[in-house]
Structures are given as C-alpha cells and as structure tokens.
Image (cartoon, grey):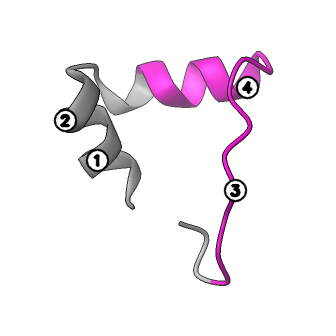
Amino acid sequence: MSIGALAARFGVATHVLRHWESKGLLHPGRDAGGR
C-alpha cells in the first residue's frame, strides 16, 4: 500500500505519517519497491 493510500484511509496527510515514522512511532514493513 502506498503512503498516499494509507494516509487517505486514516484521514491524515502523508507528511504526518512520515513524521510519525521518523519519531519511531510507526515501523512499516516494506517490500522490494519500498512500499
């Protein structure tokens, strides 16, 4: 799932998800394509 699709699903902006990831609050699994 792309970050845009995930952000839309939860009703937040993509930069919010990226910020949470940078702070260690999210630990997304990624495939070979970085998704």
Q: Amino acid at mark 2?
A: Ala
- Which residue is disc 3 drawn over? 29
Q: Earlier in the sequence, mark 4 or mark 2?
A: 2
Distance from the alpha carbon under mark 2 to that under mark 1: 6 Å
Residue type at mark 4?
Ser
User: How far apart are labels 4 and 3 at the CA level?
Assistant: 14 Å
33 left or right of 15 in image? right
Badge 2 is on which residue?
8
Question: What is the crowding at mark 4: few (fewer than 14 residues within 10 Å), some, or many (at least 20)?
Answer: few
Circles 2 and 1 in contact, beta carbons < 8 Å: yes
What is the spatial separation of the Cα atoms under label 3 and label 1, in whole angstroms?
15 Å
- Above or below — where is 21 with respect to 2? above
Where does the magenta region start and end?
16-32
Q: Residue at x 49, y 27 (%)?
A: 17
Point 40% across, 48% down: residue: 3
Please tell me which residue lies in front, 16 or 27. Answer: 27
Secondary structure found at label 2: helix
Disc 2 from disc 3: Cα separation:
18 Å
Q: Is residue 8 within the magenta segment? A: no
Q: What secondary structure is found at the residue carrying circle 4?
A: helix
Residue furthest right as drawn: 24
Position of residue 1 measured from the top left corner of the image (x, y, whole percent)? 39, 61
Residue under label 1: 4
Query: Of the residues under marks 3 and 1, which one precedes in the sequence?
Result: 1
Horizontal side of 33 relative to 12 (left or right) equals right
Residue type at tag 3: Gly
The answer to which image quadrant residue 32 occupies is: bottom right
Residue 28 highlighted magenta (yes or no)? yes
User: On the image, numbered disc 4 is attached to which residue?
Assistant: 22
**In the rendered structure, which amino acid carries the disc numbered 1?**
Gly
